């Protein structure tokens, strides 16, 4: 994003002039994700940083993930929401971005003794494709299509929350699970009892069929202690805001992203982070909230 666009977005502040900025005593409701996952951990750090700074109060909402977060944002039950960038669509009409914050890693997990070595090997198996309401649920279907599998017919798909899926995998009730999150994810017993399947070769087919939201990334060796390096697919996370979020509140949150970045790195964030002004503003088709744009203009000078 260039300076000209930032200035144009700043002018858009007039659109929200009628929206109250609110008070630091009124909590901003942040739709996060499942307990044990990256979104939930990151949101907790944002809440703590906001408490220290004292400019805005933030309340973390535990959810099933991106798609539920977008519904809460659209329904006015959340003020700010984390979402995978490939979940952005009509559901975000009228919403603004506060920033692109981290890269999520698609992790296809099987038992250590599984014969599954590639996505194509999932034909006829039982797979949990993320919880209902999660971004992984739709991304997982896209991954299967890219590998030449029909999600409705070639696998027995289920949609379990992460903790339930991990227990089901260990018990042999499912054969694989897909998770979109940071690395390492603490619930994965890799490499002792579980193993990651390489899916990086599907990045190109997914970009060709579904758009540029997908990046070829590597989970380095020993991110899971003793685990091998694995090629996989990255999807950026966006922090979105409802149009009704006050400019002062939006600005206070962006200041946390810029100036408290070191305190916003969960243990699950061994991968790519975008917590600097140059990367935060690359929010694709979603325009910056005017309150956010003002802070980024000041940061860029």
Image (tube, grey):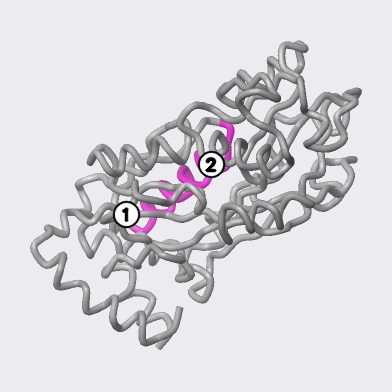
Q: Position of residue 47 (x, y in %)?
A: 40, 47
Q: Quadrant of residue 74?
A: top left
Assign the magenta stretch its main secondary structure: helix
- Is residue 47 shown in magenta? yes
Label 1 Cα crowd, 10 Å radius (few <14 / some 14-19 / many 20+):
many
Q: In this view, does 80 lie above or below 187?
A: below
Residue 138 drawn in magenta: no
Horizontally, residue 225 falls left or right of residue 162, namely: right
Q: Position of residue 296 (x, y in %)?
A: 38, 76
Q: Name the residue under label 1.
A: 241
The tag earlier along the polypeptide, 1 or 2, is: 2
- Label 1: state its secondary structure: strand
Whole-percent x, y for residue 287 in the image: 35, 67
- Residue sitting nearer the eye, 138 or 51: 138
| In this rendering, position of residue 65 left or right of residue 8 | right
Q: Is 149 placed above or below 95 here?
A: above
| Picture layout, residue 250 above or below residue 137 | below
Task: Indicate the position of residue 89 as horizontal and vertical percent values.
Answer: 40, 51
Residue ID at (15%, 68%)? 15
Q: Judge depth for marks 1 and 2 and give the one in front.
A: 1
- Residue hosting label 2: 41
Q: Residue at x 34, y 49 (%)?
A: 90
- Residue that appears at 79% across and 47% down: 223
């Amino acid at each position: 994003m260039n300076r000209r666009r930032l200035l144009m977005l700043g002018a858009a502040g007039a659109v929200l002039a009628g929206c109250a900025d609110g008070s630091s005593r009124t909590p901003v409701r942040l739709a996060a994700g499942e307990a044990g996952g990256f979104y939930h951990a990151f949101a907790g750090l944002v809440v703590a940083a906001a408490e220290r700074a004292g400019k805005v109060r933030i309340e973390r909402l535990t959810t099933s993930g991106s798609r539920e977060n977008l519904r809460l944002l659209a329904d006015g039950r959340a003020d700010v929401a984390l979402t995978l960038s490939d979940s952005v669509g009509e559901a975000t009409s009228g919403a603004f971005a506060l920033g692109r914050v981290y890269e999520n890693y698609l992790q296809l997990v099987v038992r250590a003794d599984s014969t599954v070595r590639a996505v194509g090997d999932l034909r006829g198996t039982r797979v949990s494709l993320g919880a209902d309401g999660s971004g992984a649920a739709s991304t997982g279907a896209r991954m299967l299509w890219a590998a030449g599998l029909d999600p409705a017919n070639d696998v027995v798909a289920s949609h379990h929350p992460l903790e339930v899926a991990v227990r089901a995998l260990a018990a042999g009730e499912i054969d694989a699970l897909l998770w979109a999150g940071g690395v390492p994810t603490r619930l994965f017993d890799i490499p002792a009892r579980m193993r990651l399947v390489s899916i990086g070769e599907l990045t190109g087919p997914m970009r060709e069929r579904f758009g540029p939201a997908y990046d070829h990334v590597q989970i380095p060796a020993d991110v899971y202690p003793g685990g091998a390096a694995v090629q996989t697919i990255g999807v950026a996370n966006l922090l979105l805001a409802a149009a009704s979020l006050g400019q002062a509140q939006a600005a206070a949150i962006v200041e946390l992203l810029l100036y408290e970045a070191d305190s916003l790195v969960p243990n699950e964030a061994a991968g790519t982070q975008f917590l600097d002004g140059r990367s935060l503003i690359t929010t694709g088709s979603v325009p910056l909230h005017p309150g956010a744009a003002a802070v980024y203009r000041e940061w860029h000078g």
